[in-house]
Image (cartoon, rainbow, N blue to C red):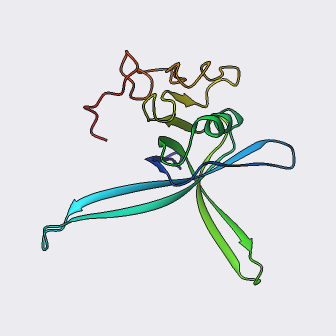
């Protein structure tokens, strides 16, 4: 194999509102906490079981950071594409600590909002050209996706209820 791939795809819900901060050079950085869950029926007891996994997501792409800040809220359903990165730092107690995050860099990340218009705005945005801004408002139903019908949106703008996720 000539190369390697570091790609993460998540579909989940935000556990809290996006946390916005700024780097020393003034660039916007957004931290997201995304929950993914799986459900199954326990074969021995017959009861429904659920396991939730929490993911740290960091958005360094200015365009996607603006979208996340304006339109995402706790509970928003989103689709994320990014890469895994592990950071190492020394805590106040002198112990080295590690944190693994899904990172959306410039030109290598995607964020699509999966909620309907009445929820968190609908539409989807990828890390396309920097001059392609978001639609004029959350009710415009626009999409930055170059192919398809807007990240799961039907041509009329409503979510297709037949989608299995």
**Quadrant in the picture for residue 49:** bottom left
Question: Which of the image's four quarters has the C terminus?
Answer: top left
> Can you say whether 38 is above or below 88 in the image?
above
Residue at 56% over, 30% down: 126
* Residue furthest out toward the top: 156
Locate residue 137 relative to residue 145 in the image: left or right.
Answer: right
**Quadrant in the picture for residue 33:** bottom right
Residue at 62% over, 18% down: 136
> Can you say whether 23 is above or below 124 in the image?
below
Locate residue 138 relative to residue 40 in the image: left or right.
Answer: right
Q: Camera-side residue: 101 or 54?
A: 54
What x and y, as percent, mark residue 3? Answer: 54, 46
* Residue furthest out toward the front: 118
Locate residue 145 relative to residue 28 in the image: left or right.
Answer: left
Q: How many labels does the image show?
A: 0
What x and y, as percent, mark residue 83? Answer: 56, 49
What x and y, as percent, mark residue 99? Answer: 62, 66
What x and y, as percent, mark residue 34? Answer: 50, 53
Residue at 31% over, 27% down: 160
């Amino acid at each position: 194999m000539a190369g390697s791939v570091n790609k993460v795809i998540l579909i989940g819900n935000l556990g809290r509102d996006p946390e916005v901060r700024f780097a020393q050079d003034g660039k916007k950085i957004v931290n997201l906490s995304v929950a993914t869950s799986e459900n199954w029926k326990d074969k021995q007891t017959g009861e429904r079981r659920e396991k939730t996994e929490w993911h740290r997501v960091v958005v360094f792409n200015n365009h996607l950071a603006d979208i996340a800040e304006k339109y995402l809220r706790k509970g928003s359903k989103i689709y994320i594409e990014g890469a895994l990165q592990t950071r190492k730092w020394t805590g106040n107690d002198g112990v080295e600590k590690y944190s693994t995050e899904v990172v959306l860099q410039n030109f290598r990340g995607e964020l699509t909002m999966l909620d309907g218009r009445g929820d968190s705005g609908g539409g989807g945005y990828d890390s396309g050209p920097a001059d392609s801004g978001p639609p004029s408002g959350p009710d415009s139903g626009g999409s930055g996706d170059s192919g398809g019908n807007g990240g799961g949106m039907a041509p009329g703008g409503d979510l297709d209820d037949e989608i299995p996720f």
